[in-house]
Image: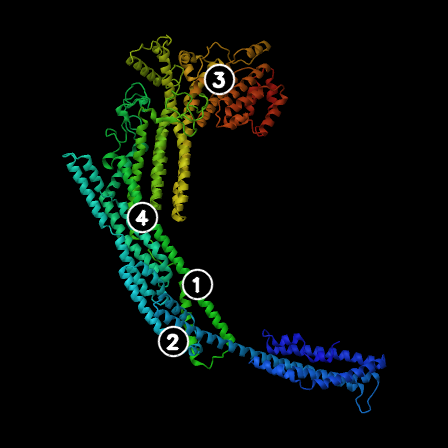
Amino acid sequence: RPTMAAVASPPPSMADALSSSDQDPSEALRALSDASEDLALKLAEDLAASLAAARDGENEECGGGGGGGKADRKDGGSDKKDKKDPQKQRQKQKQQQRYPIPLPESLIDVGGERRKSASAADDQAAVIARARRGDHDPHDEQPPLAVALASSASILSSLSKVASGGSRASREMRELEDTRRSLDEEADDVDDALRLRELAAAGADALGARRYADAAAAVRDFKAVCPTVRASELAGAHTVRGYERTREVLQRSVLERYEHAVAAGDVAGLSELTPLLGMLDLANKGVGLYLRFSQSVLGREMSLEADNEAEAQQRAEAMQEAQGGAQQRISRAEQRRRDANRVATVTVCTKLAKVYNAAVTHLRHHLPMVAFALGEADGDAALVQLIHLEVERRSVEVIKGYAETRDLAGRETRAEGVAGRIEERYAGGSGGDGFLGLGGDDLWAAMGLGGGDGGHGSAPPSGNFSAASDINPGDDPSVDDCGFRAEVGRLLDVDASMDEIALLLQHTESYERFVRHAVDEVNKGRELRRKQKLDELKKRREAEERRTIERGGNNKGDDAAAAAVSAKREAEDREIVSLEAQGSKPLEILPAHTPLNEVVAEVGGYYSGLERCLLLASMQRAFLNASRPDDRNFAPLAILNVGNHSSDQAGGGAAHAPPRHPDSPGARALQTSVVEECLYSAQRSTLRAFATGHTGTASAAANFCVDTLGRVLLEVLTRRAEFGTGLLKPGDGLLVGQGGLGQVGQAALAVMRDTAKKAGRKGLPGAAAVGGGDKTDLQDDEERALMRYRIEVGVARACANLNDLEVATDYARRLESKFLSEIETGYPRGHETEQLRMCVKGLGGVTDSFRRSSDRTVEQLVGTLMPRVRSVVNESVGQESSVASAAPFSTAFGGGMGGTPAKAASGVRMNYELDDDAYELAQVSEGYMIRLCSSLDETVRPLRSHLAPRLSDAVLLGVLAGASKRLEAAVRRTKFTALGALALDSDVRHFVSYGKERVSDSSPELTASNVALYRACKPLARLAQIASLMNVDDLEDVLDLISSSKRKGQWDLSLDDAKAFLNLRVDFEGRKVNELLRISEED
């Protein structure tokens, strides 16, 4: 239970409530009153309980005796405490001397109040103890109830004093806090005054010692102090006057030295003094002086007078040498002396490089310092503008002069006309006489299979080239090049001119990117300075507002201070509004389109037109080169890295490529030089435009590349492939047909006879037999080998034209990937770069066009082979015997072409109505299927080894499909027994195995399972399904076979087809077959 002494002192929670600044004073007093009432009620309850216990008389004697003694001791102690203690008085005086701020009266009287409360508590305790003992003093007239009332009144009085003391303590604490704040402000003002005096003295001393950097730093720090009126008064007027005098003298001295450094071009002096200008409020004047210095420096470094004089001297020397070269001969020593004295070649690129390098160097060296020291006055933006104007004035003049000297506008106009004529020749359908505008009707020579007379004769082929063949068709004046040489110039000269223009554009674009980057960096710096300054102003304003709130209006009576503070706030408000109004909008330092951009765009247009014409002329030269009888125009198929098995293979081979079987698909495949030369020209032209860095020029070049490859090259390659397909037509071309060799084969034999006659050797007694005359066999092995060589070369080079479309497909895909990687690494991200990327992606459509054209050409080739395939199938199954006339040629040339002699028509024919003896005989004899596969090999094998693997597979599948259709028609006319059905299944399996063995390694999915082969060749799948259907043992198994195959997606026969084939089984009744399959197709 709490004692009276504990009640007399307020609890900690009450003191906290009174001293808390977060709560309103009235609310705090109300809460304190409520807490006091609760405490008084609790004490009254405790007192009532004590009085009730006293009336019961428990422990009366013990409680009375002990209580009296204690009361007497307490009374004695109270009397002693009332006396003054000299030692405590001295300690109190020392504390007052230590703390100048006097203690509140409430805290001083705390001891006395506590002593009085303790004495009263002792008196009350003594009274209560006597009441409990029943020992009433005769002089004490107060009954126990009166004692209780007195105690309650004492408690209430103590609580009232506690409440009043807490309110007075709170008020005195607030007054104490105000006093502390005032002292802190006075201390801050004294500190500011002392700092002002120190900075003024330091600035004056540094100025006297000519330490301008230290003096400027002192001036800057003096301005940053921001003293109050009282601080200024404490610092003294002499301090302010000394500062003003120091600042004025320092400004004048620094400005004079700066002007002298600008006039003398003293970079070191400028580097030392420029950072001081911002500290001394001379930034605006410093910007003008620094720009004058930069202009003078740039004028010296960008001067082109020496280059112009050197260029004039070069022209004079060139004219002098041209005039005197034919008249006089000079010695080698004189020539060496002239070469040593000859000045370096001056071109438009060297001039522009000099201008751009000077600008970039000056900007890189001076912009950081100007941005740091003069950025507040927009000195960095002014410097960038000045440098760009100086560059623009000189470079525009140089570029315009170059365009006029080289007549770029006229050349571009003439080039457009030439480009239109080239496109009309090769892509417009007006190829002129002969093949692709070559003149003449000798198709053998047009394919590069003629002699060394330029393709118009029938001279023998050789590895040596005549003088006529060594001449580049693109530079041969006798070749019709659509006027390119006469109107535009030689290819090499135009190509060199394109390099020069591209370098000009590259230099200009590099400078343009650099200066635009510098503009972006300047704007970033301005934005950072704006945000930093705005943050500093806002923080300063918040600190001042906090001080004002804490000050509580102490300066209201000081009108001068209030006016100064108000003016300062208004100035800061205006500055904050101005900085916020600027926002993040960048400063337009340079316009979006400058005169330099305009002249570069004009030159870029000229460049694009000339580049397009050059690309078409280069492709035209490739077309003309491919028409020459030159083995160098043929090479092994590059997309396979295929080596040549024999050293005498036409077109040469890769020495280090892995060897392949000569009869494997693509093992001896060739390609012409057309695709590589055209794609190289397109790549060189486009990458050169990309190297300029100019997005518009690069986009135009990419569009020209896509358009030229997708129209001109595609048209030429398609026509050459179609022509090669015509050369491979059996019977009319290089392949064996029903009547032997065709016209092209006869031309090869004629060339061979002419070769033999010119060599003085014996003629070809068997040549007439091949043409349909005598049937005398060839006797001369050398002449036979030569004939095989000529035919094989013809087939290989005809197939090379089909392979060109495959090569073009692969190269176009690689070219697109290369262009995209160049864009990714060489161009910045942006809208224009994305447009350029979309232009390059147009090559994807070109790749698809090449692939579709290749597929159409293969379909045409398969169509030309179909008559021969149908004839071979008819002869093999015993329906026709028209292939026998081709046997002499096959016998003579089968070894060279990989074929075998065709069997006589009297062999085993298709017959599946077999009994036991006939079945056994068929198993041990050579059937028609073996002869069929051998005859198909005679036609397909030359194509398989000389076509690209994908094309070889396509041709093989086409031939298999045609043969399967023909076999299905023959099967429909044949009766079957159960053993005959087994024989059919064996023959079909042999035919499928033949197809799988001849599929290339590039299509492993076709050799992995029969299902993939069936999906690729539907007629072959139907033939296999027919064999499975005919091999059912019972009609009841037919429905299970059909339903299970349909569930797997491996059934293509209709119900009518199934009925027709099942009716061919002699052991199946037609009535039962029809009843069994009387269901709809949907079921």
Amino acid, disc 2:
Val
Please name whichever residue, 179 or 483, is drawn nearer the observer in this view of the structure.
179
Q: Position of residue 908 (x, y in %)?
A: 51, 11
* Residue 305, x across and y down, in percent: 22, 50
Look at the image and tell me in which quarter the C terminus lies.
Answer: top right
Whether residue 184 sits left or right of residue 854 in the image: it is: right
Residue 875 shows up from this direction = yes
Which quadrant would the N terminus be assigned to in this image? Answer: bottom right
Identify the residue position indicated by label 4 in the image.
508
Q: Nearer the viewer, mark 2 or mark 4?
A: 2
Whether residue 1083 can be seen here: no
- Identify residue for label 1: 532
Label 2 element class: helix
- Marks 2 and 4 sit apart, C-alpha to C-alpha, by 56 Å
- The residue wearing badge 2 is 240
Nearest the viewer among 750 and 859 is 750
Cα separation, mark 1 vs mark 2, equals 29 Å
Instruction: State yes or no: discs 1 and 2 in contact (Cβ < 8 Å).
Output: no
Q: Earlier in the sequence, mark 1 or mark 3?
A: 1
* Mark before the other along the chain sequence, 2 or 3: 2
Q: Vertical placement of 1019 versus 530: above or below?
A: above
Q: Say which label, 1 or 2, has the lower sequence index.
A: 2
